[in-house]
Every structure is written in structure tokens, then in C-alpha cells.
Image (cartoon, rainbow, N blue to C red):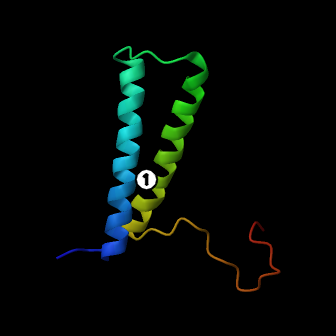
Amino acid sequence: MAFVDEATAKAYREAWDAWSRQVEHVHRVFLEGEPIRPDQIKGLLNREARAKEKYDAARLRLLGVDEAPPAPANPDDNPFR
């Protein structure tokens, strides 16, 4: 019995796979010495960070955790009071 709908599960798996690929590339460069031009390192790290953000969001959806703060009852109310 699945805990989530198929679309949520698929999005989670895709986000996990994408992040895993980026982490593997980071490991190949930093741990195994795969050659990379210095100007490509920033892009490598940015791709890994963006993939991690997407994975984190998909994981929260999978777990049913809403990361957005609750909306105030009155849209004109300041939520930071």
C-alpha cells in the first residue's frame, strides 16, 4: 500500500535520481580527481545545489509536510507580528 499518489512518488524519484547524479559528479571531481576546468566548478556546484533543493521540496511533499507558512486570515495582516 503506497502512502502517496503516483505523481508525488514519481516526482520524488525523479528528484532523487537527478540529485544523486549531481552528487556522483561532485564526488568524481573532488574525491576521485576527475579533471574539470576551474571555470566549470561553480556550475557543477550550482547544479548540485539546485538539484538538492528540488529533492528537498519533493521529499517534503512525499512526507506530507507543507513548507509554506500558513496564510494569515486577513491578507492585509502582517504575518511577522
Asked if 11 appears above or below 16 in the picture, the reply is below
Residue at image position (80%, 73%) is 78
Is 73 on the left or on the right of 64, as rendered? right
Residue at image position (58%, 17%) is 38
Is 67 on the left or on the right of 75, as rendered? left
Asked if 35 appears above or below 43 in the picture, the reply is above
Question: Which one is in front, 50 or 77?
Answer: 50
- Residue 53 picture location, percent across and down: 51, 50
Tell me the amino acid under the disc marked 1: Tyr
- Residue 74 picture location, percent across and down: 76, 85
Residue that numbered label 1 is attached to = 55
Is 28 on the left or on the right of 53, as rendered? left
Question: Which one is in front, 74 or 32?
Answer: 32
Quarter residue 59 falls in:
bottom left
Residue occupying the far right of the picture: 76
Quarter residue 9 falls in:
bottom left
Residue at image position (56%, 37%) is 46
Classify the position of the C terminus by image quarter.
bottom right
Residue at image position (43%, 53%) is 55
Asked if 23 appears above or below 30 in the picture, the reply is below
Classify the position of the N terminus by image quarter.
bottom left
Element class at badge 1? helix
